[in-house]
Image (cartoon, helix red, strand yellow):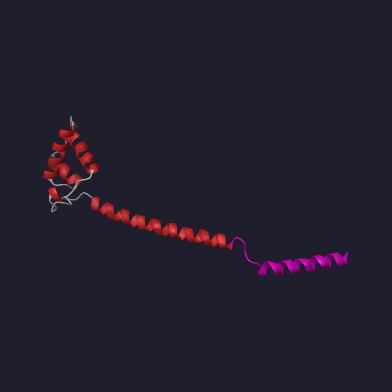
């Protein structure tokens, strides 16, 4: 009985020493997961930074953001045109639409005229 206990004790000490010196099979996996997590956090930070810049550009201020850019030199995105159309349907004045869409009143009139020619009604 004593020999069995002694052999089990020696075996357990040997396994303990072996476990200390063996490589952790999940260490590489954990390192890769940590690296991927850090990359994801960095990418999210960059996306949030870009989103913040875009939000600041789209904020509606007292004066239109693009007031100093002539309408004929700048292409107006279709989303802005749809916004102008919806605001016109809601009954807002050209000045109010210009402020909310960051366009000049002339650009708003141009978009409204273009939408009329396309067959969109504002009623």
Vertical position of residue 99 compared to residue 15: above or below: above
From the image, which quarter does the C terminus lie in?
top left
**In this rendering, position of residue 82 left or right of residue 30:** left
Q: Residue at x 75, y 69 (%)?
A: 14
Rendered position, 123 above or below 7: above
Give left or right: position of 48 versus 1: left
- Answer left or right for 79 relative to 18: left
**Residue at left 83%, top 65%?**
5
Residue 34 location in percent, x, y? Answer: 50, 60
How far from the left and from the top, in percent, is residue 77?
A: 22, 45
Residue 78, percent across and down? 23, 42
Task: Give residue 68's quadrant in the image.
Answer: bottom left
Front residue (pair 121, 92): 121
5 in magenta: yes
Against 4, is 104 above or below? above
Name which residue lies at 73% across and 66% down: 15
Residue at the outermost left position: 106
Judged from this view, the residue extending furthest toward the right is: 1
Residue 96: image x %, image y %?
A: 15, 42
Residue at image location 21% in from the left, 41% down from the top: 81
Main SS class of the magenta portion in the image: helix
Q: Read off the magenta span.
A: 1-26
82 versus 12 height, above or below = above
Q: Nearer the viewer, residue 71 or 10?
A: 71
Is 18 a magenta residue?
A: yes
Count of numbered circles in the view: 0
Q: Quadrant of the N terminus?
A: bottom right
């Amino acid at each position: 009985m004593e020999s069995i206990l002694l052999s089990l004790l020696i075996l357990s000490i040997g396994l303990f020493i072996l476990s200390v010196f063996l490589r952790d099979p999940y260490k590489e996996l954990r390192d890769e997961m940590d690296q991927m997590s850090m990359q994801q956090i960095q990418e999210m930070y960059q996306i949030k930074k870009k989103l913040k810049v875009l939000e600041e550009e789209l904020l509606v201020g007292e004066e239109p953001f693009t007031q100093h850019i002539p309408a004929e030199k700048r292409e107006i995105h279709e989303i802005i045109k749809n916004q102008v159309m919806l605001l016109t349907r809601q009954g807002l004045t050209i000045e109010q639409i210009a402020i909310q869409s960051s366009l000049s009143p002339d650009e708003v009139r141009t978009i409204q005229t273009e939408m009329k020619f396309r067959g969109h009604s504002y009623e």
